[in-house]
Amino acid sequence: MNHWAKQNDVLGTTNRGNAIESGLCTLCRADCKGKCETWLSSLKGRATLYPRDFGLVTAGSGNTTQNGVSYNALRIQGACYGAHGMNGNEDKARSGDCLFTDVSLATSFGNTVKTPCRLPLMTGALGSTFIAAKYWNSFAVGCALAGIPIVIGENVVGVDRASELEGGRIKSAPELERRIQTYLRYHDGMGAILVQLNVEDARNGVAEYLAEKYGDRIVIELKWGQGAKNIGGEIEVTSLDYALFLKKRGYLVDPDPEAPGVREAFESGAVHSFARHSRLGYTAQNSYEQVREEFMNSVGYLRGLGFSRITLKTGAYGMEGLAMAIRLASETGLDLLTMDGSGGGTGMSPWNMMEHWGVPSILLHAKAHEYASLLAARGQRVVDMSFAGGFARETSIFKALALGAPFVKMICMGRAMMIPGFLGTNIEGALHPERREAINGNWDSLPATVAEHGRTPEEIFGAWHSLSARLGKDEMSKIPYGAVAIVTLMDKLSAGLQQLMAGARRFDVSEIRREDIASANRETESETGIPFITEAGDEIARRILLG
């Protein structure tokens, strides 16, 4: 494991635990009192982009050399002239009046039906882990207001004790309904709500249920895996009764709550919890041809139900699995392929598995571009892509968009998108004790790390006033503070990304190119195909000097 600096004196940030490349801690807690960069950005927004204590300080970077292959070993290139992608603002470009705020971050993804988004960002899958259920209101409302897609992960129906199945098929799904309706209430046409299907979801009839109730308002996401693990999804339950319920639903529960001696071990305290596991999928197939046939049938069946937008999420599998995902997603006309590299996050995965399995994000993403280019060179359509696996800062977002250009339309963020939901909820619970239990707040009072920014939401959240002006005071009173924190974080990421794009003279997301980044060491050049920093543009430089 790489260990990164835990403190940034320039920004005034500190990691509670071990820092990783994204700037997050390895273990991210819902009750954390701060203050990593993402945590602080959820309060201050774009103010976090700049050194603290202006007028008293000067600051200098120590991050000019990097070792090893990582997104930190890519450098962002600036440009001295030009304004690509002004899209109707050419007169402003010619006048020399361009500002970074002229950069458009709007994008879209899709095959025949395009899904517009305000930002090239989306959430990772928030599924049956209880932390997703607890903070869903903040996540869903915040993403809807930001105009970005949110993904309901696998197994939500299966673990919901209030859901009703008849003959193995869903008749009612209260938790799934709650999650969908919460997002749709504030959805204004930008972004979308995706619902994942794993093996259990397919058997339980989730797709049929959604098709009948929502039709094409829902995007269906097929699930092959994630970067955190190479087995099916897991949750932990601490109730014997709940463990028995999950086994009856058809899940593997470990240890088996019906096995001799397990009940006694649980009651005596020797067994404290049970792990629920999902099926692996594709265990009956033994070749690419068999997987292809099954996949084509699945996509055809979903289209027959009426879904015009279908996506695929895959994990940090090796080159064969990556090639299969790109080829099949392109061949079947899917709308998005999300590739999650090792280095991403989890609600529950075996820790040593996370540390040692799979292809690291930058290597997976570099090969994804290489393989996509092979298909494009043959004149074949390439599925729109989303890169996932450890993104939290605007710098890595820009680098990933450039590394995958022109195929990558979205960057998928997991834990970084959840942190503001936790933080805002805790602040709301501290300021309004009467709401604390209902919203799952963890604080009795504001910690000093928050109180130094204010003691009212108007003082604390950088995006409060702009959001209130947009919604009106009456509607603003209904917005979870966690959603406000998400919008505040999006403000920081948006401003930072606009600045980086303006510096590269790219005024539209579609204009970002691989030429906008360079490798800081030879190993990264070799693995990514991105030229070493002193050789990127060297030919043009020589023509200028000798021409």
Image (spheres, rainbow, N blue to C red):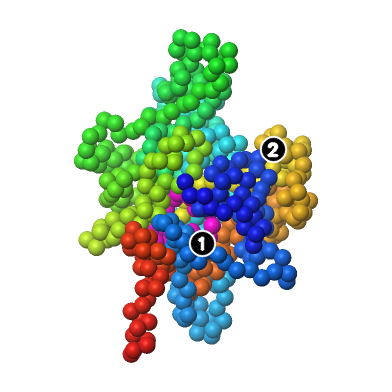
At horizontal 68% and vertical 60% (from top left) the residue drawn is: 466
Q: Position of residue 222 (x, y in %)?
A: 38, 41
* SS for callout 1: helix
Q: Nearer the viewer, residue 521 or 128?
A: 521
The label shown at residue 395 is 1
Identity of the residue drawn at 71% across and 59% down: 465
Q: Which stretch is magenta?
A: 386-409
Q: Is residue 178 above or below residue 480?
A: above
**Tag 2 near tag 1, CB within 8 Å:** no
**Front-most of residues 19 and 390:** 19
Please name whichever residue, 305 or 76, is drawn nearer the observer in this view of the structure: 76
Q: Residue visible at 64% across and 65% down?
A: 50
Q: Going by the image, does 324 lie left or right of 450?
A: left
Task: Let me know if residue 377 appears in the view.
Answer: yes
**Mark 2 Cα-neighbour bin, 10 Å: few <14, some 14–19, many ≥20:** many
Identify the amino acid type marked 1: Thr
Residue 128 lies, in percent from the top left, at: 51, 34
Residue at x-position 55% and y-position 65%: 62
Circle 2: element type: loop
Residue 526 left/right relative to 434: left
Residue 403 colored magenta? yes
The kind of residue on which mark 2 rests is Asn
* Quadrant (top left/top right/bottom left/bottom right) for the C terminus: bottom left
Tag of residue 442: 2
The correct choice, above or below, for 308 with respect to 516 in the image is above
